[in-house]
Image (spheres, rainbow, N blue to C red):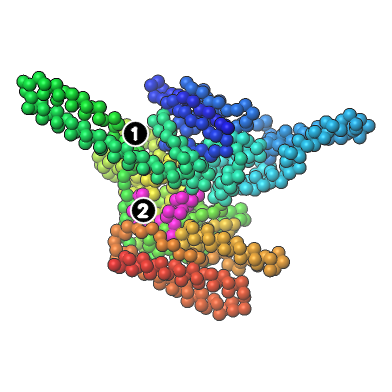
Amino acid sequence: MIDISIQKVKKAYEEGVDILDGITFDVNQGERVGLLGKNGAGKTTLLNIITGQIEADEGSVVVPGFKKLGLISQIPQYPHGYTADDVIRTATARLIAIKNEMEELEKAMADGNGDSLLMAYDSLAFEFERSGGYNIEFEINRVVNGLRIPQAQRGQLFDSLSGGEKTRINLARLILESTDILLLDEPTNHLDMRATIWLEEFLGKFKGSALIISHDRYFLDKTINRAVEIEAGKAEFYSGNYSYYVQEKQRRYEELLEKYQREQAEAKRLNDAADRLKQWGTGNEMLMKKSFAIRKRAERAVTIGRPSKDKTMRAKFGEQKFRGDEVMVIKGLTKSYDGRKLIDIDEIEVHGGERIAVIGDNGSGKTTLVKLIMGEEIQDSGTARRGPATKAAYLPQIVKFNHPRRSLIETLLYDLNVSPQVARNRLGAFMFSGEDVFKLVGDLSGGEKSRLRLCMLMNEDINLLILDEPTNHLDLSSREWIEDALDNYNETLIFISHDRYFINRFATRIWKLDNGNFTDFQGDYGQFLDYEEKQAKQTDASAVSHSGTQKPSSRPNKTVPAGSYQKPKARKPADTQKELRRLEREIEKHERKLDEIKLLTEEFSSDYEKLMELDLTQQGIHELLEGLYEQWEAVSE
């Protein structure tokens, strides 16, 4: 059955420029379709046409009248004084009305009119039970807890909430309404990692249809089974998730390029033949006609233009030759807000070439930690000391410029003290070309501001790069570009991100903040997930053996290695000797940890749980060392 039928839809916001140019496709019941395309390609416009918020210039969109449609980017108006909980409970308005009607019938039957009203009451009771009326509170709490909506927030006035908080409340309402067709426009933008995972699991069980716009590639991989890419007003179709789309798009490009090259070669062969005949046939009418006919064949041989790929930014980070092993040492660092401890780190060291992902729920203190490292916040106690040869650069989550009324080129001229030609070249490398360089900085979008700040950072020789949600405002092609740039950056990287695709690609070490507890994990993101799963199983087993009680951790600052080693993707070291020194430092550090574990094993010889934890840690270090030895040998060769 077709849930959404889109037929020959056209839409233009300025004359002669169709943002949608005859788009046609169907969404079948139960499908999860990802709408892909660059920012401004028309994805949100299409969702708004489907919901009737705007009208198409031509074509039609048909949704069955009995299907309930829900758009997550559209936040309805609610009566003044409604709390977040009132908004959530509008999803159960029909069930509440049935319940009130049942209560009225119960009163009437108690007054002696039972026989005539019993059938009506039974019908209502059946509908109430069938629709899950007896589980209302359970369902509300399940969805609200899954989306990480705090209990205190439920009591706040809806109008007082931020845009992100309203979006989250609205998503909870749509889910509870049992919507048949979900239209999700960047649903993960205001969700932390746990809430995003919960939404993925919900969509996996959702029996309706979903049309999803997202720049979260991991989310798309988990949720969609079909992709529609909008490019230049037209639609291209891919039967698979995001990873399939990437591979298939490249395959199609290579296929078209090969066809184009074949046609060009054939056209050249025919034109060369026509030129020879023309040269030989001067004065010979028959040869001249044949030359003309061959040239016409050459024109018909070319059926396609040269296939194009998206423009990409072309630049790389400057790197400072690192002197010394120590990038940063953190000791006894603490920070609290309103009596709530966010940061509590005993002692950790950061060495050259590490790539550290800082993860945790919204509000857990991730940005506070990097601001403490950069000296933009004052700690309650302890130190975060950078090495004497460390030169740091910081890209904040919200980028601001001191002079928003300056143009892009003026900003580079004043702040970087470069010539106009150098400024234009650098801006061009970051996809600011032509008249774009005269835009005012204050008029840029969030993604454009991040791009401009990166353009300025990459001019510097740095060996510690700190990024706070670097992919937040970027479309898919820009995310891929920054990843390519970071692939060629061989110095130390610390980054905050909810983008699991990005974390999975880069992290060699994980710092997790969770209610004031700090975990320092040596390994990549996949190994970290394995470690957390093992820890959860151990906790469950411990809880059973202690009759429901769990022994609290004596140390909030846990340093743990990977439970299983997977050889990381080969890097491109700019200096082989530098890479060897980095690996030798890593090997020495983990060998010291083995010595520490040996001492701890003797200290906790009678603590069975602690010994199990130490044994798991020791196994992980041995596996990690094996991988480091392999890398050392490969680089040495």
Q: Could you tell me which quadrant the C terminus lies in?
A: bottom left
Q: Is residue 84 left or right of residue 126?
A: left
Callout 1: SS: helix
Residue drawn 51% across and 42% down? 224
Residue located at (51% from left, 75% from top): 597
Q: Amino acid at mark 2?
A: Asp
Residue 327 in sight from this viewpoint: no
Magenta stretch bounds:
484-510
Q: Is residue 106 visible?
A: yes
Residue 374's quadrant in the figure?
bottom left
SS of the residue under disc 2 = helix
| Residue occupying the point 56% across, 40% down | 164
Q: Position of residue 583 (x, y in %)?
A: 37, 67
Whether the residues at callouts 1 and 2 have beta carbons within 8 Å, the answer is: no
Question: Residue 177 at what x, y percent from top left?
Answer: 66, 36
- Which one is nearer the viewer's eye here, 385 or 190? 190
Residue 218 place in picture, x, y as percent: 49, 48
Give the residue type at disc 1: Asp
The picture places residue 618, in percent across and down from the top left corner, at 50, 72
Q: Earlier in the sequence, mark 1 or mark 2?
A: 1
How dense is the environment of label 1, judged by Cα within 10 Å: few (below 14), some, or many (20 and up)? Answer: some
**Residue that label 2 marks:** 487
Residue 295 left/right relative to 548: left
- Outermost residue, left direction? 283
Image-quadrant location for residue 139: top right
| Foreground residue among 390 and 354 | 354
Q: Nearer the viewer, mark 1 or mark 2?
A: 2
- Residue on which the image places disc 1: 436
**Residue 444 sits inside the magenta stretch:** no
Q: Residue furthest front?
A: 286
